């Protein structure tokens, strides 16, 4: 009897739930709202954020655009970008966050994920485990980061979700940019 696959690596599930709670807390503190644009994680980042009751106050939602056709049709990733650089590229994840922010009018921060979770699909230039991430605050240029994760498909997806959450935290300010009025 084979063991059924799980959505998250069991050794990381608890820390991912805690990390997503930390992201929600920072979003509230800084008065930001997040949207996700996911490919290889298949909505896992959005699922972690919405695991927590009340998360709708700072989570706008997420787009799962697994195919290139949906990346293009829904998020507006250009056909040229997809054909020239591929779905797993800095250029694609940057366009994914721009599209997510354009569509989710109330979101102020977006994170995107596109990679090769395996077990097949890799190449010498883009090995299994390569994941690209995009992150942007509304009105700012998107940034792209890449990581090569090890392990099976479940492990790669879990590590990618954790990294995406960490990127949101890294790119949010420490506190709200609103200046409070001091009353005497």
Image: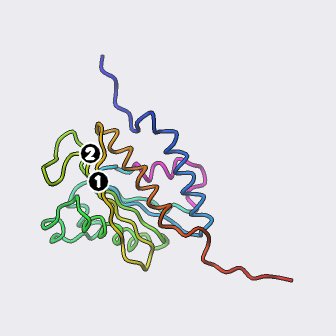
Is the residue under label 1 in contact with that under label 2 (CB below 8 Å)?
yes
Q: What residue is drawn where x is 50% and y is 52%? A: 49
In x, y percent, where is residue 54? 60, 54
- The residue that mark 2 highlights is 117
Query: Is residue 98 left or right of 51 when viewed as pictured?
Result: left
Say few, some or many: other residues with alpha carbon within 10 Å of mark 2 (under 14 / 14 to 19 / 20 or more): many
- Of callouts 2 and 1, the N-terminal one: 2
Q: What element does badge 2 sit on?
A: loop
Q: Quadrant of residue 112?
A: bottom left
For the magenta stretch, what is the residue range?
44-57
Give residue 41's mark: none
Residue closest to the far right: 184
Looking at this view, is 152 or 48 the one in front? 152
Magenta segment's dominant SS is helix
- The quarter of the picture where the C terminus appears is bottom right
Q: What element does badge 1 sit on?
A: strand
In x, y percent, where is residue 15? 51, 42
Residue at mark 2 to residue at mark 1: CA–CA distance: 8 Å
- The residue that mark 1 highlights is 131
């Amino acid at each position: 009897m084979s063991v059924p696959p799980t959505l998250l690596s069991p050794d990381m599930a608890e820390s991912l739930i805690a990390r997503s709670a930390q992201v929600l807390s920072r979003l509230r503190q800084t008065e930001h709202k997040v949207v996700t644009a996911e490919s290889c994680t298949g909505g896992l980042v959005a699922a972690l954020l919405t695991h927590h009751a009340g998360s709708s106050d700072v989570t706008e939602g997420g787009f799962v655009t697994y195919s290139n056709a949906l990346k293009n049709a829904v998020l507006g990733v250009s056909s040229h970008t997809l054909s020239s650089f591929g779905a797993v590229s800095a250029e694609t994840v940057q366009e994914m966050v721009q599209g997510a922010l354009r569509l989710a009018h109330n979101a102020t921060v977006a994170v995107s994920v596109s990679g090769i979770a395996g077990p097949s699909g890799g190449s010498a230039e883009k090995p299994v485990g390569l994941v690209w991430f995009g992150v942007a605050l509304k009105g700012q240029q998107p940034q792209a980061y890449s990581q090569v994760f090890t392990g099976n498909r479940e492990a790669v997806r879990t590590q990618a979700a954790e990294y995406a959450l960490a990127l949101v935290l890294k790119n949010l300010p420490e506190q709200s940019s609103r200046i409070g009025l001091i009353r005497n």
